[in-house]
Amino acid sequence: MITLRPARPDEAHALSELCMISKAHWGYDDAFMAACREELTITAADFDHSQIQVADDNGALAGMAQLQVEGDKAELDKLYVHPDFIGAGAGRSLFEWALSEARAAGATFMTIDGDPQAAGFYRRMGAIDDGESPSGSIPGRTLPRLRITL
Ligand SMILES: CC(C)(COP(=O)(O)OP(=O)(O)OC[C@H]1O[C@@H](n2cnc3c(N)ncnc32)[C@H](O)[C@@H]1OP(=O)(O)O)[C@@H](O)C(=O)NCCC(=O)NCCS
């Protein structure tokens, strides 16, 4: 059974690998994935300036979400579900956690720079399209930007 809990700093490496495995689910090639590695690496500093929540399946990492809140603005930095658990509701649970935490921290809206193949998921969660953002990993690539009012 999947439950949510805060990530532990000693899980940084395992969470980085989870992000890579999850992203690769869309079929990106090795060069693309190598270019994404730095952006998908969770560091000790991430635990200082953001909240990271894990979807835990009896000790296995099923997914994770990373949230940053600054003033009235929240940013969902990462939301990655392990391919073994995609389609089983972990994404929704982690997204709802982010909404709840962002609201509690005083944010009035949350933005997401989404993978194009995940944009439909965010729309399903109630987000609306809000333009495009440059990819942090691939020069010249743009990502759909989405926004949800809290
Ligand atoms: C996108 C992602 C987080 C969704 O998580 P998930 O656990 O598979 O989603 P859920 O099972 O909670 O689905 C919730 C709802 O969204 C829908 N949905 C899920 N993924 C979708 C997608 N890619 N496009 C459209 N709808 C989607 C589901 O059908 C479900 O709909 P329902 O309310 O009718 O049941 C997951 O597919 C993933 O991690 N993908 C790979 C990495 C990635 O791209 N992450 C996002 C980076 S921005």
Image (cartoon, rainbow, N blue to C red):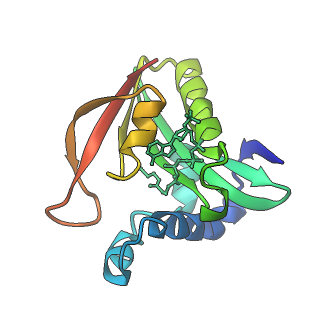
List x then y, in percent, for residue 56: 76, 52
User: Looking at the image, which residue is at 48% across and 50% down?
Assistant: 78
Quarter assignment of residue 108 = top left
User: Looking at the image, which residue is at 60% across and 54% down?
Assistant: 86
Residue 75 seen in the figure: no
Looking at this view, is 47 or 25 the one in front? 25
List x then y, in percent, for residue 106: 50, 17
Name above or below for residue 42 compared with residue 79: below
In screen coordinates, is 106 left or right of 104?
A: left
List x then y, in percent, for residue 103: 54, 19
Looking at this view, is 41 or 36 the one in front? 36
Looking at this view, is 53 or 146 the one in front? 146
In screen coordinates, is 34 left or right of 103?
A: left
User: Looking at the image, which residue is at 59% across and 27% down?
Assistant: 101
List x then y, in percent, for residue 134: 20, 52
- Extreme-bottom residue of the structure: 30
